[in-house]
Amino acid sequence: MQKILVSRCLLGERVRYDGGSHGPFDRLEIWRREGRLVPVCPEVAGGLPTPRPPAEIPGGQGYRVLDGEIGVLTLAGEDVGAAFRAGAEAALALVRDHGIRIAVLKARSPSCGNRENYDGSFSGRRVPGEGVTAALLRRHGVQVFSEEELEAAAAALADLEKG
Ligand code: SF4
């Protein structure tokens, strides 16, 4: 059975930076009952505590963090990029362990966001971009969806299972 990597905060787990969570989502509940879900919170897996200071990627491009060009900065200016990279590697290890080809990750997170990100100014301004984990998984051929694209994720799963 094809497994799906999923952000832990989308499953109601209180791992967000502010101690919050999201959901429930009917589609994720179905997949959970089917035994398909492999949950991960890259920021917690990378060693950050909950709650933790909000952090943003200057310019919003997670691949630049992966490549060591820039960091991930808190409002106070602390660079937590190393923890974000470690969390992305932990997610990739799960992908390899489970043969995963689809992920559903939280939109607009500096780790998990798949299409958009905040721009690093902590002003709520959004830019096209992706989080550090989403960027690493894409590099390794994983199709990354958000909780706003669950029907598209379901279609991709159906395609994969058709073989
Ligand atoms: Fe963790 Fe990703 Fe959810 Fe942030 S968006 S709390 S890193 S699972």
Image (tube, rainbow, N blue to C red):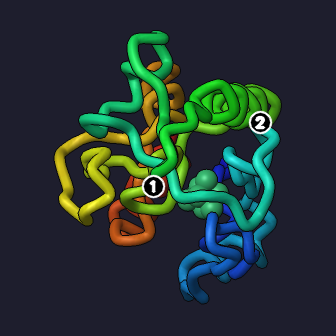
Q: Nearer the viewer, residue 111 or 53?
A: 53
Q: Position of residue 158 (x, y in %)?
A: 47, 57
Q: Quadrant of residue 99?
A: top right
Secondary element type, mark 1? loop
Question: What residue lies at 80% left-to-right and 55% top-to-bottom?
Answer: 49
**Label 2 crowd (10 A; few <14 / some 14-19 / many >=20):** some
Amino acid found under the numbered disc labelled 1: Ser
The mark nearer the N terminus, 2 or 1, is 2
Q: Is mark 2 within 8 Å of ligand 1?
A: no
Q: Is mark 1 within 8 Å of ligand 1?
A: yes
Q: Is residue 141 above or below residue 150?
A: above
Question: What residue lies at 80% left-to-right and 65% top-to-bottom?
Answer: 35
Report the image quarter containing ligand 1. bottom right
Amino acid found under the numbered disc labelled 2: Leu
Query: Which of the labelled discs sits on residue 94, or is there none?
Result: 2
Which residue is the site of mark 1? 109
Nearer mark to the viewer, of 2 and 1? 1
Instruction: Give the left or right position of residue 97, taking residue 3 as reference.
Output: right
Question: What residue lies at 43% left-to-right and 30% top-to-bottom?
Answer: 135
- The reply to whether residue 80 is visible in this rendering is yes
Q: Position of residue 145 (x, y in %)?
A: 41, 54
Total count of labels: 2
Query: Which of the labelled discs sits on residue 86, or is there none?
Result: none
Q: Position of residue 51 (x, y in %)?
A: 72, 67
**Label 1 crowd (10 A; few <14 / some 14-19 / many >=20):** many
Mark 2–mark 1 contact, CB under 8 Å?
no
Using the numbered discs, state the Cα–Cα distance from disc 2 to disc 1 in whole angstroms: 19 Å
Q: Is residue 96 above or below residue 68?
A: below
Q: Position of residue 42 (x, y in %)?
A: 68, 45
Secondary element type, mark 2? helix
Question: What residue lies at 39% left-to-right and 23% top-to-bottom?
Answer: 63
